[in-house]
């Protein structure tokens, strides 16, 4: 075999996702892009705020000597300082610039975290449903992902997490607001989880981290706010990006923030900085660092996503679908009316509707819809959703 056996296995295990996208491309070639209702990708539908374009132009025109030179692997000091000040406002703590590392998006952030903390065979617990890449990220660094079911409303099942913790547990990786469910974990649950991790760390003589993947932090609805993970547990680390709140996913810019009270923090930060370099990221994109450094607190109009959520939720509820109304992000995760959600998703394709089966998120029996699409896509797809639902009920 010309490629690594492990990679061949990964390709095979994710082949159903590839086939779904291939089917989407086929449908678009036959019916035209506007006649296929694509809810499969979490690609922001809103343009970046006007401030982004204006500030980007001013940065590009900067002719200061050395502006394109090497920098520390952790990123520009002035950018990390600006980020630390925003994190302080959001999290209710006072991290310094040395507690922040600029990264190539949240994915780059999660990979340097796991590279820094995992030994071969270490386990990373994550509540299911979970983002499809987490298993690959853990495997990248010799770890093993351990999915744990959530409650019926997709909130944390602390008892289930406790049963899953072993001497090999190194982290609990959470994602709130969650992809694919849109759930926001309440502060009381995070405090309880932090107490549990502290207890188990003492029991096993190790450090079990709470790692929070937060690219959707600023996209919440109905007055809901995302609790401060850093305040809930000292050995906590945040990975996030500007992909969703500034609508710039292709720019691959984000950061990692470490709780100021984390155990052995200087060594942890140093390990992540080294991981940035040896994983090939070296440092986050210089141009985008300078841009986001001047745009702290700026984000897209979240009310637009709230309106799209309501349009989709109301239409599907009228058709009979069951789901938990998302508190954040821009995904809906309805229950399939049949046990095999892949069969149901294929039936949706007959109506030129593209969705993602829940099996890829560790939650068979559900399917994911991304409503970061134009209003016409939602409105025109609703009759097809209703017809397919009636086929199975």
Image: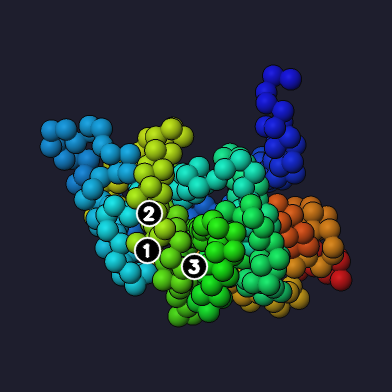
Q: Check the picture and name the quadrant holding the N terminus.
A: top right
Labels 3, 1: front one = 1
- Residue with the mark numbered 3: 305
Q: Which residue shows up at 64% across the image and 44% down it? A: 121
* Residue 158 appears left or right of 231: right
Q: Secondary structure at mark 2?
A: helix
Colour convention of the picture: rainbow
Q: Which mark is residue 265?
A: 2
Q: Depth check: 62 or 360 in front?
A: 360
Q: Secondary structure at mark 3?
A: helix
Q: Depth check: 382 or 254 in front?
A: 254
- Residue that protrudes farthest toward the left in the picture: 64
Q: Which mark is residue 98?
A: none
Q: CA distance from mark 3 to mark 2?
A: 37 Å
Q: Residue 80: x, y in percent?
A: 28, 52
Q: Residue 75: x, y in percent?
A: 30, 44
Marks 1/2 in contact by CB < 8 Å: the verdict is yes
Q: CA distance from mark 3 to mark 1?
A: 35 Å
Q: Which residue shows up at 39% across the image and 54% down it? A: 264
- Residue with the mark numbered 1: 261
Which is nearer the N-term, disc 3 or disc 2? 2
Disc 3 crowd rating (10 Å Cα; few below 14, some 14-19, many 20+) is many
Marks 3/2 in contact by CB < 8 Å: the verdict is no
- Residue that protrudes farthest toward the top in the picture: 2
Q: Which residue shows up at 51% across the image and 57% down it? A: 207
Q: Is residue 94 visible?
A: yes
């Amino acid at each position: 075999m010309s490629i690594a056996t492990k990679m061949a296995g990964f390709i095979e295990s994710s082949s159903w996702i590839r086939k779904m996208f291939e089917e989407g491309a086929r449908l678009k070639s036959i019916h035209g892009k506007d006649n296929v209702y694509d809810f499969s990708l979490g690609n922001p539908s809103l343009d970046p705020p006007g401030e982004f374009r204006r500030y980007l132009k001013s940065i590009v025109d900067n002719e200061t000597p050395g502006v394109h030179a090497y920098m520390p692997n952790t990123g520009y000091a002035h950018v990390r300082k600006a980020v630390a000040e925003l994190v302080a406002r959001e999290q209710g703590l006072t991290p310094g610039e040395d507690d922040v590392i600029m990264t190539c998006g949240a994915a780059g952030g999660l990979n340097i975290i796991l590279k820094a903390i995992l030994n071969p065979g270490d386990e990373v617990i994550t509540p299911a449903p979970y983002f499809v890449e987490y298993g690959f990220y853990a495997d990248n660094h010799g770890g093993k992902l351990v999915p744990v079911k959530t409650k019926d409303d997709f909130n944390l099942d602390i008892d289930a997490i406790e049963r899953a913790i072993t001497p090999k547990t190194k982290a609990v990786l959470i994602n709130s607001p969650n992809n694919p469910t849109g759930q926001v974990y309440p502060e009381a649950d995070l405090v309880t989880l932090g107490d549990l991790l502290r207890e188990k760390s003492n029991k096993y003589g190790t450090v079990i981290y709470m790692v929070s993947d937060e690219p959707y932090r600023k996209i919440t609805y109905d007055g809901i706010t995302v609790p401060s993970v850093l305040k809930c547990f000292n050995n906590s680390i945040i990975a996030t990006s500007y992909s969703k709140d500034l609508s710039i996913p292709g720019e691959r810019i984000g950061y990692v923030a470490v709780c100021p009270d984390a155990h052995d923090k200087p060594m942890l930060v140093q390990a992540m900085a080294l991981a940035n370099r040896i994983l090939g990221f070296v440092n986050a994109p210089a141009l985008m660092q300078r841009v986001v450094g001047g745009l702290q607190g700026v984000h897209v109009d979240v009310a637009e996503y709230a309106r799209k959520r309501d349009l989709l939720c109301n239409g599907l509820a009228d058709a009979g679908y069951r789901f938990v109304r998302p508190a954040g992000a821009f995904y809906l995760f309805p229950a399939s009316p049949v046990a095999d959600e892949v069969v149901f998703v294929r039936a949706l394709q007959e109506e030129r509707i593209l969705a993602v089966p829940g099996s890829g998120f560790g939650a068979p029996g559900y399917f994911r819809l991304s409503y970061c699409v134009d209003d016409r896509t939602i409105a025109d797809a609703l009759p097809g959703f209703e017809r397919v639902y009636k086929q199975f009920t």
